[in-house]
Image (cartoon, rainbow, N blue to C red):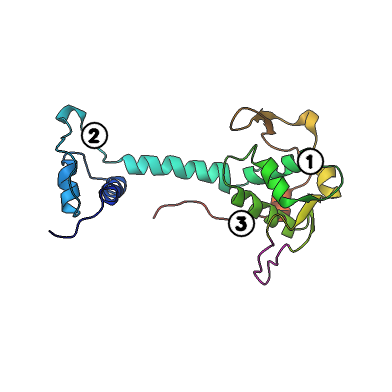
Amino acid sequence: MGHCLPFREAITAIYAKLLYSTHYSLEKDFDDEIEELGGEAHSSYQVPKDKRLQLSGMYQNWFLDYASYVILERAVPHIEDGLKPVQRRILHSMKELDDGRFNKVANIVGNTMQYHPHGDASIKDAIVQLGQKEMLIETQGNWGNVLTGDRAAAGRYIEARLSDFALDVVYSPKITDWTLSYDGRKQEPVTLPVKFPLLLAQGAEGFALGRS
């Protein structure tokens, strides 16, 4: 008996083929596909003709929707306040925690996760980038070095608080537009009423998605 792929790996390979081929349709029996990949068929079920789905073109549409979301909701700063969504949520979270003293970055990350529906690592990296610019956040501890490429210490070892400049120019609750957070439990700012051209002063770096 020849080499056989585990059933799960065979299914994964088929799924990858379906996802990345724009001219593939479900006209082949799954068992035939599994056997072609060296797997063992678990069923002789065939998809009825009236239930078959043409996948041609779906990848382009799905990719464009996904790319638009990433670019607008994660990668590009808003022209009104110069902040990316994660940066805005960090600053809002830090204002909630602000009592004039330093907070551990790990605590700021945890509080920001109430507003940011992505991973804690992305929040911590964004805090470090803001802190390294020494404009909106005062730092304490090893925050790395942008010139040498040294990374910042773990969030449990470094601390941050809002700078006097940030407290003076970033916040004004009475003229802030608010929206519900991703789970509907909290309110977060649509944009912050920044009285300073942050986008020009800070610039922006990062990466998004594209096609060639």
Q: Is residue 147 magenta?
A: yes
Say what amino acid the circle numbered 2 marks: Leu
Residue 97: image tag: 1
Q: Which residue is mark 2?
A: 53
Residue 8 image point, x, y percent: 29, 48
Name the element at disc 2: loop
- For the point 17% across and 27% down, the residue is 50
Q: Earlier along the polypeptide chain: callout 2 or callout 1?
A: 2
Q: Earlier along the polypeptide chain: callout 1 or callout 3?
A: 1
Q: Classify mark 1: residues with Cα within 10 Å, few (<14), some (14-19) or many (20+).
A: some
Instruction: Give the answer, above or below, for where 128 lies relative to 166.
Output: below
Q: Tell me if residue 93 can be seen.
A: yes
Residue 109 image point, x, y percent: 68, 47
To which quarter of the image does residue 48 belong? top left
Which residues, given as a range, are shown in magenta? 143-153
Q: Which residue is mark 3?
A: 205
Q: Is residue 58 magenta?
A: no
